[in-house]
Image (cartoon, rainbow, N blue to C red):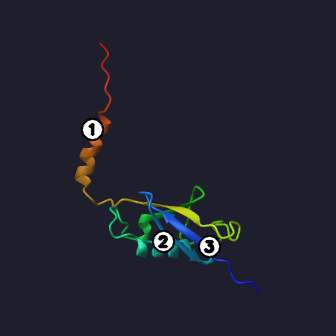
């Protein structure tokens, strides 16, 4: 019987750097992959995710669900003959950080354009 083909993935972060590439079984869930990304997250990066719920993985323009396997997400197996698949990682910023500063930063945007008709 043929050996299960592994999927080679790398993960593109918001600043253009990558985590990986690493090989995963097609039966690996997206939630498990997120845990591995969190463990490998570069320590020197700002806006680091705290939990896996702070991360979203995007492949082929679709956000991947935690409970699905890589095979269920239609990640091509064996089609690229050794090619690495790049997935994008989106980090949801923490909501509790500096809410007061965020409100101050947002307020000028609302008043950016004003018109006076005389």
- Ranked by sequence position, the earlier of labels 1 and 3 is 3
**Image x and y of residue 97, in percent:** 27, 59
Assess disc 2: are there few (<14), some (14-19) or many (≥20) residues with their C-alpha within 10 Å of its C-alpha. Answer: many
Whichever of callouts 2 and 3 sits on the residue coming sooner in the sequence is 3
Nearer-the-camera pick, 77 or 99: 77
Q: Closer to the camera: disc 1 or disc 3?
A: 3
Corner quadrant of residue 45: bottom left
Farthest residue, direction front: 82
> Is 56 left or right of 25, judged from the image as shown?
left
First in sequence: mark 1 vs mark 2: 2
Q: Quadrant of the N terminus?
A: bottom right
Helix, strand or loop at label 1? It is: helix
Could you give the CA–CA distance between mark 1 and mark 3, rounded to whole angstroms?
47 Å
Q: Is residue 80 visible?
A: yes
Instruction: Return the residue at label 3.
Output: 7
Estimate the x, y position of residue 57 in percent, counting from the top left: 51, 63
Check disc 3: other Cα within 10 Å, few if <14, some if 14-19, many if 20+. many
Q: Nearer the viewer, mark 1 or mark 2?
A: 2
């Amino acid at each position: 019987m043929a050996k299960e083909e592994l999927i080679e993935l790398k993960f593109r972060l918001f600043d253009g750097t990558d985590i990986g590439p690493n090989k995963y079984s097609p039966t690996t869930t997206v939630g498990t992959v997120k845990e591995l990304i969190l463990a490998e997250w570069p320590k020197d990066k700002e806006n680091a995710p705290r939990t896996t719920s702070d991360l979203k993985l995007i492949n082929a323009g679709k956000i991947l669900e935690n409970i699905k396997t890589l095979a269920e997400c239609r990640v091509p197996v064996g089609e690229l003959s050794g090619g690495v698949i790049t997935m994008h990682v989106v980090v949801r910023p923490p909501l509790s950080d500096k809410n007061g500063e965020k409100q101050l930063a947002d307020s000028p945007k609302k008043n950016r354009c004003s018109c006076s008709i005389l």
